[in-house]
Amino acid sequence: NPINNNLCSKCFKEVGQKSNADSSNGSPAAPAAPSQKPTEPELPLTQLAPAATASVPPSTPTPTPTISEPAVASPEPIIVDQQLELHQQQQRLEQLQQPVHPIAHVAPTPALLSPVLHSTAPEGRPVQTNKGRCFMCRAKIPLAKQAINKCRCEYVFCDSHKYTDKHDCEFDFAKMGKELLAKANPKLNDKPRGGRSFTRLD
């Protein structure tokens, strides 16, 4: 067998045992290596310093990164805006704190009411409060006849007392008739509306 160096198994074991025994006995120790290297001749410090400096490369200065800080805006406009807002708030508070003056209600005086009272109800003349009753006999008057039976003297009467001779009416009908006739009849000396003037012939 080539694996066993062309030996049988028994012979291969014997050869292996012999080789192991030889290796255990050990070969003679190798001479010890010198522990120290031969020392170099000492050089003066003046000669060593240039060599050390020459061996070390010159250190290049590393550029420091410059950080650009954002420009800070001046606080003056912010302060001005705050002052304006405070001033406006103070004005609003002052307006709210001002007392509200109520509108004075002017009560009508008797002097103001006197012309109206005298025109509707002269002194010593009674006023009819209930228009649904006759001013003379206190008879009930229907609503439809309250406007019909109303006299020129501003009183409402029933059918029997609505005439002027039945309730002693104070209204002067004769004077009213004369005024109506005077307005309706033209005067003789006035100019006619046609535009041409004429004179009366006697």
Image (tube, rainbow, N blue to C red):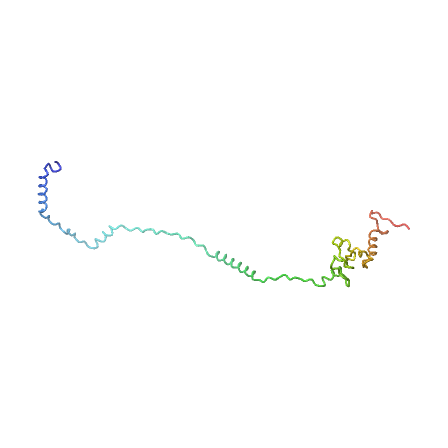
| Rendered position, 123 above or below 11 | below
Give the percent coordinates (x, y) of residue 108: 69, 62
Left or right: 82 with respect to 144?
Answer: left
Q: Is residue 3 left or right of residue 46?
A: left
Question: Closest to the observer: 127 or 58?
Answer: 127
The residue lying toward the viewer, choosing from 78 and 16, is: 16
Which quarter of the rendering shows the N terminus? top left
Percent from the top left, x then y, of residue 45?
Answer: 21, 55
Give percent across and percent down for residue 18: 8, 43
Q: Is residue 97 above or below residue 4?
A: below
Q: Position of residue 119 (x, y in %)?
A: 76, 59
Closer to the camera, 148 or 192?
148
Q: Is residue 29 shown left or right of residue 119?
A: left
Q: Nearer the viewer, residue 53 or 184?
A: 184
Q: How many marks?
A: 0
For this orientation, the residue located farthest to the right is 202
Outermost front residue = 139
166 w.r.t. 6: above or below: below
Side of 101 where 66 appears, left or right: left
